[in-house]
Amino acid sequence: MLARRFAVAVIALIAVVAVPDARAAGVAAARRQARGAAAESADASMPIARAAVPDRVGPAGFEGPLTFERAYALALLNSQGVRRAQLAVDAARAVLDERTAAFRPSVEASAGIAYIANPPDGITIPTGAFGAVPDPTSTFPALVPDQPLVLVPDPENRGMSVSVEPRQTLYAWGKLNAAHEAAAAGIATELSRSDGVAAELRTRTATAFAGVVAARAALPMVEAMAEVQRERVADTELQYSAGTVTRADLLAERVTLATLDAQLVRSRQGLRTAERALEAIIGAPFADLVARPTDATLSDEGTLVATANANSPRLAELRTIEAQAGIRVRIIDGSRPFLPDLGLSVRADAQGQRIPLVQANWRDTWDANLRISVGAQASLYDGGANAAERRAAVAGREQTASAIIELVDALPLQVRVAVEQYEVARAIRDEAAARLESARESDRNAGVSLENELITRGDRLGARLRLLEAELALLSADAAIERALIEVESIVGTPLR
């Protein structure tokens, strides 16, 4: 029965700490593998952070074992979620540049050439069209006109035109400024989301890191328990041969050994899964780990709540979304009917027929013009669309404000529960440490008593099992403290150690 309790404790320890994140990491790894070589080649064509990841971590990659800080740095470097968040920030900055460009003038240019197959005829007065008059110097009358008089020359078969038109918005009822502010708020929103992705990744990395540490520490204890149980089975077999115990006693010990062997297999497989989970998160294999300290001094709950309020990426995201919603209302207000937008346009154009600088007298066929205009454009009737759009924007802003209030109101309880878990885990750890000290003393006394033949070998092995139970309980308490600290750090948004 004692060994069964040990096995159940080991399973609970490894399952709680290592398995959940291992499953998530396994699914993510499977999805990445399913993308195939095409996706990998597409990723390789872009300057992403994965190209800078070392091939190995630990002795083969850099000096010393893997610390949590280095693991988190590698996770940030390799996370596609972080990369997508950074790309979203870049896209938001590009939107801000686009909104900034709306304040500057735009310049449009056009040029064209056309061929006219049958151009209209020009106007020419032929010779003698107005008759003839006597010429005193000649026996023949003088024709009027005496040569063809070209009033409008025949047009060329080609026509060319060039125009340049700068445009500038003069007044838009605050819509340009509001759009610029919305784009700036969009950057803040994406930065908050990026912080949230990094914070979630830190929690996942911490959970997986703690899972590997706990699984590696638990495995030797399970192996030791199985070894002690094998000795108990061997002793029981000798006692059965001597007729001092029944066959049922022997079979019970063998069942216990089989149970511990099964738990040993589960512990080894759980350790491998936990290690693969951490490798999937940091994107590289690793060797030894440096366990994180479990000692931390928590501030009072009021300070923790204030810190959580200030550092929460979700709260920051919601606040910027609320600001964007308010700006959206301003943009809609500036788009109401009977609010004209004013703009300035300056158009310079030229048309001609002969190629400049190539054909003779090309200036005679070209004309230029300059047009300066100030225009206004406004909606007179939109069927109530603007008012409906404004109501929707106001409702969205109020929804976001409600979500902010709900999240702020929930923070004190979240902090309270996390602090409770941490304090209870520390108390249980102190109890486990006291029990371990007592078990060590009992184990030493049992060894001395066995040497003096005051107890049996079975009693000695029982004391050793109780020592292993106490060591496992202390390990479980340390893992509980680690989980509680991870939860507190996740809520307040800042490391506590």
Image: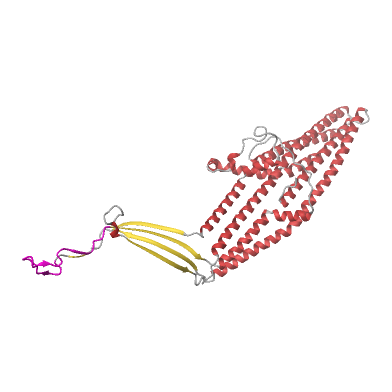
Outermost residue, front side:
137
Q: Residue at x 58, y 63 (%)?
A: 328
Image x and y of residue 274, in percent:
70, 40
- Kindly tell me whether residue 343 is visible in this rendering: yes
Asked whether 364 or 157 is in front, the reply is 364
- Kindly tell me whether residue 1 is visible in this rendering: no
In this picture, which residue range is highlighted in magenta?
Answer: 128-157
Image x and y of residue 122, in percent:
23, 63
Rendered image quadrant of residue 157: bottom left
Image x and y of residue 452, in percent:
93, 28
Outermost residue, left side:
139
Image x and y of residue 168, in percent:
47, 62
Image quarter of the N terminus:
top right
199 vs 218, left or right, is: left
Q: Residue at x 12, y 69 (%)?
A: 131
User: Is 392 placed above or below 308 here?
Assistant: below
Give the prevailing secondary structure in the magenta stretch. Answer: loop
User: Is 371 placed above or below 3 here?
Assistant: below
Q: Is residue 135 magenta?
A: yes
Q: How is the image coloured?
A: secondary structure
417 vs 186, left or right, is: right
Rendered image quadrant of residue 222: top right
245 vs 132, left or right, is: right
Q: Residue at x 62, y 36 (%)?
A: 54
Asked whether 24 or 321 is in front, the reply is 321
Rendered image quadrant of residue 293: top right
Image quarter of the C terminus:
top right
Q: Is residue 396 magenta?
A: no
Q: Residue at x 49, y 72 (%)?
A: 380
Numbered circles on residues, count: 0
